[in-house]
Image (spheres, rainbow, N blue to C red):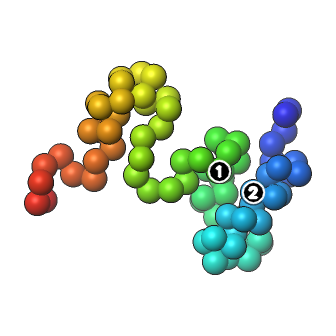
């Protein structure tokens, strides 16, 4: 797709994400999450945690998991 913003796929995903985040469509279009969604052109990666396939390709699965932890040690 040449332009993702405003496409049928984008509108469909925006409706789902707006409902999930308990926002109206107008509020969703103005939010930072929508900017991220439009930039990455998918719904993946909007959840907290987890590793991304780009990180896995760069540094490997275990290092990508370690880099994505909330803190570097236990009990902090």
Query: Residue at coordinates 69% horizontally, 69% vertically from top-left?
Result: 18
Q: Is residue 26 visible?
A: yes
Residue 45 coordinates in the image, percent (x, y)? 54, 48
Which quarter of the picture shows residue 39?
top right
Spatial CA span between label 2 and label 1: 7 Å
Q: Residues within 10 Å of mark 1 (few under 14, many from 20)?
A: some
Residue 22: where, in percent of width, then height?
64, 77
Q: Residue at x 83, y 57 (%)?
A: 11
Q: Residue 72, how many percent across, how many down?
A: 18, 46
Is residue 26 shown left or right of residue 48? right
| Residue corresponding to mark 1 | 43
Q: Nearer the viewer, residue 52 or 24?
A: 52
Say whether marks 2 and 1 touch (CB < 8 Å): yes
Side of 41 where 36 appears, left or right: left
Q: Is residue 30 visible?
A: no
Residue positioned 43% across, 30% down in the render? 55
Instruction: Name the one closer to the observer, 73 or 38.
Output: 73
Quadrant of res 63 = top left
Quadrant that contains the N terminus: top right
Residue sitting at 81 percent across and 58 percent down?
Answer: 12
- Residue 54 sits above or below residue 40 on the image: above
The C terminus lies in quadrant? bottom left
Quarter occupied by residue 60: top left
Q: Left or right: 73 with respect to 10?
A: left
């Amino acid at each position: 797709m040449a332009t993702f913003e405003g496409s049928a796929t984008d509108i469909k995903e925006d409706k789902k994400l707006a409902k999930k985040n308990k926002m109206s469509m107008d509020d969703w279009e103005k939010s930072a999450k929508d900017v991220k969604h439009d930039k990455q052109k998918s719904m993946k990666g909007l959840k907290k945690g987890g590793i991304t396939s780009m990180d896995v390709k760069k540094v490997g699965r275990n290092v990508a998991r370690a880099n994505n932890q909330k803190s570097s040690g236990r009990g902090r």
